[in-house]
Image (cartoon, rainbow, N blue to C red):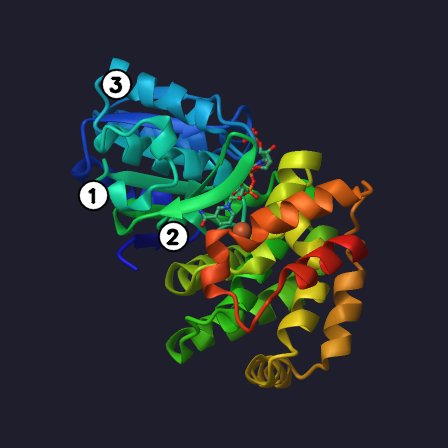
């Protein structure tokens, strides 16, 4: 995991000068409001001013970025002669910044978006997260919608060079986004155990990360300004990102993508809605069942306690899924690249039956 991490309160003020090693003219990629609301943009501009780094701001990235938004960013990068990108915001602007950098550096067309093997270089990427969920600040992945399909792609060249992770930037999150993003991080951590690429070396991060979310999420919703709690969630999200950078994500992730595209269900919520179903499905595999038992022993809880805790967040699908949708999307999900890391022998029937139940 080659990203240099600067973690903690006011880390940008302390270490932001490092950005000047990466380039002279930055494209700052953000959403509409989050970079401003979180306070990150103002602090970044101050650092860039001090280091005499030119910048342009591209603030047209909305939730779940599409390829067209990304290509617009590629044009702005070129028009302004930028030589590196800074993604500021949730996973959406950070993923878009990574995609802009990779597409521009490799002269790719939009149809190449999922051809990870065509990515042989990138412009330097800086990430400043304002949510604690995706871990995109430490992964080589980007998730972009192309022709109504949401999928991830990635390359070792897409790891950010430096990430500035400051829990203060997440204090402006409302309770819904706090919940959804933390549940996304929880998915990543669990998927580190589920994935066929599981690796005991990263188990300490998984165990600690799950424990931080389990003990801090409800309290954070009650005390959104508490920086210790916000720091716990940020740390867990960072661990989740480091984990999936090694193991990839599984069906737990790709089953939610069509729900996001079709119904606008947020990424984290989509993960949460299927979390119990997926755990039950994977636990049919004896190895996974044992791994999960070990995790809950560490947490000193039973699997049912975990399910009861999940139920408290009331994560339910609000739309009815039609039979035609379930049939078409189950095929798409079965072909998703996340299936490569999915354990056991998951069938089309398994996927259809989860979609029917939710
Ligand atoms: P997001 O889509 O970046 O943002 C969700 C909402 O939160 C937006 O309305 C955003 O506002 C707002 N927001 C963000 N930070 C805020 C703050 N500090 N204060 C107030 N509002 C704030 O959310 P996300 O869950 O972090 O990212 C989800 C995306 O990441 C999905 O596309 C998902 O597939 C992807 N993802 C990527 C990876 C990876 O490894 N690369 C892993 C998991 C998920 P603005 O619109 O103003 O920005
Ligand atoms: Fe995710």
Residue under label 2: 139
**Label 2, label 3: how many angstroms apart (C-alpha)?**
25 Å
Q: Quadrant of residue 347?
A: bottom right
Whole-angstrom CA distance, mark 3 to mark 1, is 19 Å
The reply to whether discs 1 and 2 touch (Cβ–Cβ < 8 Å) is no
Q: Are marks 3 and 1 in contact (CB under 8 Å)?
A: no
Q: Residues within 10 Å of mark 2 (few under 14, many from 20)?
A: many
Q: How many marks?
A: 3
Q: Is residue 348 visible?
A: yes
- In this figure, which residue is indicated by the disc labeled 1? 120
Q: Kindly report which numbered mark, 3 or 1, lies closer to the viewer in this rendering.
A: 1
Is there any visible trace of residue 10 in the rendered image?
no
Task: Quickly name the residue at label 3.
Answer: 78
Circle 3 SS class: helix
Q: For marks 1 and 2, give the CA distance.
A: 16 Å
Label 2 vs 3, first from the N-terminus: 3
The structure residue drawn at horizontal position 72% and vertical position 47%, both measured from the top left corner, is 326
- Toward the top, the furthest residue is 79
- Residue for point 66% across, 65% down: 278
What x and y, as percent, mark residue 121? 20, 41
Under 8 Å from ligand 1: the CB of mark 3?
no
Label 1: few (<14), some or many (≥20) within 10 Å? few
Q: Pinpoint residue 175: horizontal percent, then vertical percent.
A: 71, 45
Answer with mark 3 or mark 1, whichever residue precedes in sequence: 3
Q: Secondary structure at mark 2?
A: loop
């Amino acid at each position: 995991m080659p990203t240099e991490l600067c973690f903690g309160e006011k880390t940008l003020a302390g270490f932001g000068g490092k950005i000047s090693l990466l380039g002279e003219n930055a494209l700052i990629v953000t959403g509409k409001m989050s970079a401003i609301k979180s306070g990150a943009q103002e602090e970044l501009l101050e650092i860039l001013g001090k280091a005499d780094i030119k910048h342009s701001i591209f603030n047209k990235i909305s939730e779940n970025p599409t390829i067209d938004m990304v290509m617009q960013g590629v044009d702005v990068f070129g028009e302004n002669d930028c030589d590196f990108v800074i993604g500021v915001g949730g996973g959406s602007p950070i993923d878009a910044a990574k995609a802009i950098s990779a597409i521009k550096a490799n002269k790719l067309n939009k149809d190449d978006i999922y051809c990870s093997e065509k990515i042989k270089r990138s412009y330097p990427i800086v990430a400043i997260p304002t949510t604690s969920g995706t871990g995109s600040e430490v992964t080589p992945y980007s998730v972009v919608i192309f022709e109504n399909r949401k999928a991830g792609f990635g390359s070792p060249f897409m790891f950010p060079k430096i990430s500035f992770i400051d829990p203060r930037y997440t204090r402006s999150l409302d309770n819904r986004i706090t919940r959804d993003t933390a549940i996304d991080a929880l998915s990543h951590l669990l998927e580190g155990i589920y994935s066929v690429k599981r690796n005991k070396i990263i188990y300490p991060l998984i165990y600690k990360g799950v424990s931080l979310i389990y003990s801090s999420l409800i309290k954070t919703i009650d005390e959104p300004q508490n920086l210790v709690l916000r720091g716990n969630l940020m740390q867990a999200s960072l661990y989740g990102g480091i984990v999936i950078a090694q193991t990839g994500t599984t069906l737990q992730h790709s089953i939610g993508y069509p729900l996001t595209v079709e119904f606008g269900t947020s990424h984290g919520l989509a993960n949460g809605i299927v979390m119990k179903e997926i755990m039950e499905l994977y636990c049919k595999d004896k190895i996974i069942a044992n791994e999960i038992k070990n995790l809950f022993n560490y947490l000193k809880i039973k699997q049912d306690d975990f399910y009861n805790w999940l139920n408290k967040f009331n994560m339910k699908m609000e739309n009815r899924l039609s039979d035609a949708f379930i049939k078409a999307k189950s095929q798409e999900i079965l072909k998703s690249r996340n299936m490569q890391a999915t354990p056991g022998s998951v069938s089309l029937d398994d996927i259809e039956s989860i979609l029917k139940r939710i």
